[in-house]
Image (cartoon, grey):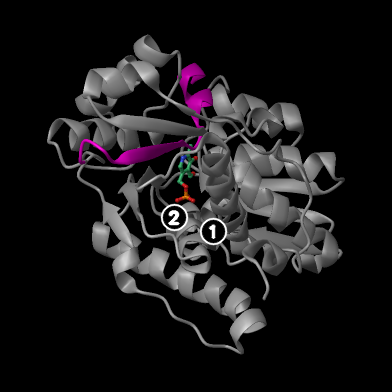
Amino acid sequence: MKTGKDILEQFPKISLSLLPTPLHKLKNISAELSRNIYCKRDDLTGFGFGGNKTRKLDFLIADALKRKANTIVAVGAVQSNFCRIAAAAGRTLGFDVHLVLGGIKPEKPTGNLLLNNLFGAKIYFVNSNDWNVWENKAKKLMKELTLKGRKVYWLPVGGSTHIGVLGYVNAFFEILEDCKQLGVIINTIIHATSSGGTQAGLIIGKRLTRWQGKIIGMGVAKTKKQLSKEVFELVHETGKLLWESITSGHVFIDKKDVIVNNSYMGSAYGERTSACESAIKFFAEKEGIVLDHVYTGKAAAGLIDYAKQKIFKPKENILFIHTGGNVEMFE
Ligand SMILES: Cc1ncc(COP(=O)(O)O)c(C=O)c1O
């Protein structure tokens, strides 16, 4: 019988991420909240300043190499963490990297923009908040580059394709292995979700291993309905790819596995909220862990609220995945 790890081995992968990342108990936060809280430190994946996106790019860049592409077009918000890591990954492996970024070009590049320049990406700004407008501009650029004879590999927002999702299937296996080493059974996983790839990968990992816990994505962009639909589609699409190799195409995914809560998002993506500011301060002061205002701070605000509202049971073990993004502190 094939294991989850065997199944992933059929897909090409490079090792940008420094794995495994640490998983440890947040002792002070656990004591303050009277709940058992652990943290998976995917802020420490290392490559290009780290974060969840290095795991997706381990598979995506390997796929681009397999397809003999020489140019990458990636799309994201003006301070996209994904585009920063895509720039580093693409450039170090010899690709030309073009980033289409939604937002206004600032006078002085800071945070991820500063790093994009350092890694040597070509940047195009699109003055819009609409993800579809960014993607249309990027697709036009792809056509132009293709006409010039470049072999282009396309990276949509967040790298959330069925290939990118494999990075978090792999992360799920790693988490179970970490827990085995620590002698802990995790009951609930909490993390920030926006383009849905991280959550989709974890859910597939849950299905493949028959883990019984809950995965809660704290939504930081889009409506709950839209994001749940997108996560489900990604699970389905990636699941098909994996399931076919083990069970001759039989796919079983339970819609109930997709849990999105966007109560901690505020009114818009990137909008600062006071609960997020407090969560950032709490993690910094209690654990020396730096979160960000767009993703992890909002997910942590949800985690803290669940603990305070006693939604978590006293004996439950909760895992917070720190998905990175803290370069944002230097914007
Ligand atoms: C720091 C950080 N956390 C979480 C996420 C959400 O991951 P996903 O897009 O896979 O839902 C992102 C996406 O950009 C991110 O940059």
**What residue occupies the far left of the structure in this picture?**
309
Residue name at image x 39 percent, y 53 percent: 130
Query: Which of the numbered marks, if any, corresponds to residue 199?
Result: 2
Residue drawn at (57%, 88%) of the image: 249
Q: Does 281 sit above or below residue 183? A: above
Q: Which residue is mark 1?
A: 160
> Circle 1: is it few (<14), some (14-19), or many (20+) Cα within 10 Å?
many
Disc 2 Cβ-to-ligand 1 distance below 8 Å: yes
Q: CA distance from mark 1 to mark 2?
A: 10 Å
Residue at x 58%, y 54% (from the top left corner): 159
Q: Is residue 167 left or right of residue 87?
A: left
- Image height check: is 190 above or below 255? above
Answer with the quarter of the image where residue 83 lies: top right
Q: Are marks 1 and 2 in contact (CB under 8 Å)?
A: no
Q: Position of residue 310 (x, y in %)?
A: 14, 37
Give coordinates of residue 318: x percent, y percent: 35, 39
Is 316 displayed left or right of 147 in the figure?
left
Give the residue type that dot 1 points to: Ser
Q: Is residue 150 visible?
A: no
Look at the numbered disc 1 and say if its residue's Cβ is closer than 8 Å to ligand 1: yes
Vertical order, 237 against 315 (above or below): below
Using the rendered image of the protein, determine whether residue 225 is visible from the camera's viewpoint.
yes
Q: Is residue 309 magenta?
A: no
- Residue 196: x and y in percent read 44, 57
From which residue to which does the magenta span run?
Answer: 313-331
Q: Position of residue 69 (x, y in %)?
A: 82, 61
Q: Quadrant of residue 67?
A: bottom right
